[in-house]
Amino acid sequence: MNARLPRLCVATVLAAATTALAGPASAVDYSPIDCARASTPADRTICGSYALGQDEARMATLYGVATALVAMGQRGDLQDSQRAFIRTREACGTDTACLSRVYATRIRELDAVIDGIASRGPF
């Protein structure tokens, strides 16, 4: 079977999720963060930014896919790294450039996890 097939399936799921989130909306409309209860400066900044809200949604989708697919031992490591990501994200406060960098790094990390799963197969 084609080794790219699993990656294409994941990409299709992510594209569908992104399409469902597209349109003239604010971060409040789709962010996994409960924007009505946003209490930290970082959360409020993410909720007020369309681009950061999209980053949050993409990261959360990738995290959900990755944690569903990894072996149990690796799941704990993934959860630990997610907690570290949240601490780093919170340290950015209202700095949108910092938040963008932190999300970009986490999205790359989660993409790498999914790529690693897809490369091992079989599917």
Image (cartoon, rainbow, N blue to C red):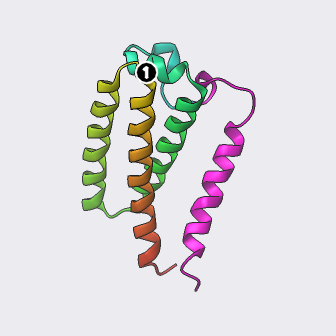
Q: Is residue 50 above or below residue 104?
A: above
Numbered range of the magenta stretch: 1-30
Q: Residue at x 63, y 25 (%)?
A: 29
Q: Residue at x 59, y 83 (%)?
A: 2
The N terminus sits in image quarter: bottom right
Which residue occupies the extreme bottom position in the image? Answer: 1
Left or right of 99 on screen, residue 47: right
Q: In the image, residue 9 lies at what x, y percent?
A: 61, 65
Locate residue 94: give its quadrant: top left
Left or right of 106 on screen, residue 35: right
Q: Classify mark 1: residues with Cα within 10 Å, few (<14), some (14-19) or many (20+).
A: many
Q: In the image, residue 65 lies at what x, y percent?
A: 48, 54
Type of the residue with mark 1: Asp
Q: Is residue 95 above or below residue 110?
A: above
**The magenta stretch spans residue 18:** yes
Q: In the image, residue 59 lies at what x, y percent?
A: 47, 43
Locate residue 112: give its quadrant: bottom left
Could you tell me what secondary structure mostly forms the magenta stretch? helix
Q: In the image, residue 34 lies at what x, y percent?
A: 49, 22
Count all numbered tags in the image, as a single digit. Answer: 1
Left or right of 81 on screen, residue 68: right
Locate residue 30: give its quadrant: top right
Q: Residue at x 44, y 62 (%)?
A: 114
Indicate the secondary structure of the residue bearing disc 1.
Answer: helix
* Foreground pick, 70 / 93: 93
Q: What residue is pinned by disc 1?
A: 43
Left or right of 36 on screen, residue 91: left
Which residue occupies the extreme right position in the image? Answer: 23
**The magenta stretch spans residue 48:** no
Q: Residue at x 58, y 31 (%)?
A: 51
